[in-house]
């Protein structure tokens, strides 16, 4: 029996040697085509398979092709907080329907990642990355201090940003922006005194986390008030709400931060545009603000309409106002839930979502701006 097993082993080795001698290597173009069909999480795993695959997935031409392919298949990202003895943040995503007439009942939410937190708030999300703030009690301190993290839900990766050095640390706010020309993510941070932004710093997200460092920048635009969670990055410009002076009746503005040049500008607005309940959204590549016309400024079963203000010319501070009427059966559709504006899809549909995710079943509502219908 031993000689037969030995002969079989020799035959296999002979076949393998003969196969490797005459087989041709797979062309790089074919490898790229195969990788482009994989999910981002699978591509991240490929970096650990071999040096060849690791070198391919970081090539600029590959990342450009993968980004273009991903933009053609947009996703809706859900950040779900579970608060009990062990507070956890979960990330899910679902395909964004491109055809308003298609049946959305078959859409399934895909789980990406989760991580524990102490007291967490979502700061901003852009181009696949999410910036979050977590209040943690660090060793040697009795009071919690803010810690900022960058997460990539598609790959399940996350890392903590370095501590921001500042002379005044009364309060800090961070925003995440993306420059589509240089293809760089940057974090904008500013310290606030009692009412005014004072120290402005920028951090560029590089390939690794060992060289991350904050850089101070100049800001010639006074910013007062407390910037809320509503911010958005459109075509390399980061927008968020503020006031131009200290007075309680001062001029409301939307601050514009160019991610590439790291320069500030601003746009004058009406108070309704920067109301705490107004959501900043991307409407066909333009900045827009959406708010309900109900007294509470949110969407309820009794709400009849909402308005959208679209920025037409930032230099002339020109806005256009549009009013949209909810269908008569809306009060039977919403089920008595309190809904919030969370974005606009590429098919010109306003997305509304409940504030709480603990209710089952959980629904997301799409209002078609052209047809005036809801699904």
Image (cartoon, rainbow, N blue to C red):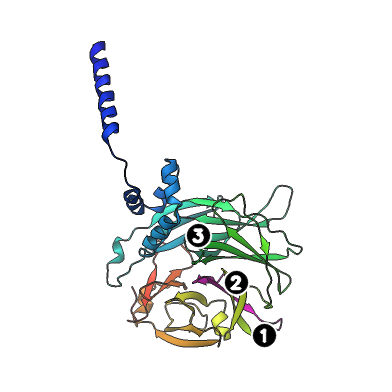
Which of disc 2 and disc 1 is earlier in sequence? 2
As rendered, which of 269 and 56 lies closer to the eye?
56
Q: Position of residue 194 (x, y in %)?
A: 73, 72
Residue 129's disc number: 3
In the drawing, does residue 23 fall left or right of residue 279?
A: left
Which secondary structure lies at badge 3? strand
Q: Position of residue 337 (x, y in %)?
A: 44, 71
In the image, which disc is placed on residue 250? Answer: 1
Query: According to the image, label 2 marks what residue?
Result: 228
Stretch of the chain drawn in magenta: 229-250
User: Is 237 a magenta residue?
Assistant: yes
Q: Quadrant of residue 25?
A: top left
Tags 3 and 2 touching, CB below 8 Å? no
Circle 3 packing at 10 Å, graded few (<14), some (14-19), many (20+), is some
- Front position in the image: 233 or 11: 11
Earlier-in-chain disc, 3 versus 2: 3
* Image quarter of residue 221: bottom right
Name the secondary structure under disc 2.
loop
Q: CA distance from mark 3 to mark 1?
A: 34 Å
The x and y percentages for residue 209 are 59, 51
Foreground mark, 3 or 2, reads 3
Residue at image location 50% in from the left, 64% down from the top: 126
Image quarter of the N terminus: top left
Magenta-drawn stretch contains 211: no
Q: Is residue 266 at all visible to an observer of this figure?
A: yes
Q: Quadrant of the C terminus?
A: bottom left
Using the numbered discs, state the Cα–Cα distance from disc 1 to disc 2 in whole angstroms.
Answer: 17 Å
* Vertical position of residue 119 compared to residue 96: above or below: above
Q: Determine whether 231 is above or below 41 in the image.
A: below
């Amino acid at each position: 029996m031993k000689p037969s097993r030995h002969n079989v082993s020799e035959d296999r080795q002979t076949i393998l040697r003969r196969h490797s001698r005459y087989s041709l290597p797979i062309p790089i173009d074919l490898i790229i085509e195969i990788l482009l069909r994989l999910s981002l999480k699978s591509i991240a795993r490929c970096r650990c398979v071999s040096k060849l695959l690791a070198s391919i997935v970081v090539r600029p031409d590959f990342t450009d092709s993968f980004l273009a392919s991903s933009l053609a298949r947009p996703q809706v990202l859900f950040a779900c907080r579970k608060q009990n003895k062990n507070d956890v943040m979960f990330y899910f995503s679902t395909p964004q329907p491109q055809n308003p007439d298609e049946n959305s009942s078959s859409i399934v939410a895909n789980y990406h990642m989760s991580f524990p937190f102490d007291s967490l708030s979502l700061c901003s999300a852009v181009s696949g990355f999410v910036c979050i703030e977590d209040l943690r009690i660090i060793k040697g301190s009795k009071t919690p201090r803010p810690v900022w993290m960058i997460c990539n839900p598609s790959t399940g990766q996350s890392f903590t940003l370095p501590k921001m050095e500042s002379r005044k640390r009364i309060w800090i706010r961070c925003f995440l922006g993306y420059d589509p020309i240089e293809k760089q993510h940057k974090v904008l941070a500013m310290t606030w005194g009692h009412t005014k932004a004072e120290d402005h710093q920028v951090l560029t997200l590089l390939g690794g986390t060992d060289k991350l460092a904050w850089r101070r920048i100049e800001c010639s635009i006074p910013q007062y008030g407390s910037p809320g969670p509503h911010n958005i990055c459109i075509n390399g410009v980061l927008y968020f709400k503020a006031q131009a002076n200290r007075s309680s009746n001062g001029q409301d503005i939307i601050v514009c931060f160019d991610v590439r040049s790291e320069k500030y500008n601003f746009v004058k607005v009406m108070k309704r545009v920067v109301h705490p309940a107004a959501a900043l959204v991307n409407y066909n590549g333009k900045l827009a603000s959406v708010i309900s016309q109900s007294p509470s400024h949110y969407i309820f079963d009794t709400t009849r309409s909402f308005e959208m203000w679209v920025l037409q010319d930032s230099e002339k501070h020109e806005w256009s106002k549009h009013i949209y009427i909810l269908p008569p059966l809306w009060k039977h559709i919403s089920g008595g839930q309190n809904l919030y504006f969370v974005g606009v899809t590429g098919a010109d549909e306003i997305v509304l979502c409940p504030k709480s995710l603990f209710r089952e079943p959980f629904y997301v509502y799409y209002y078609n701006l052209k047809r005036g219908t809801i699904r």
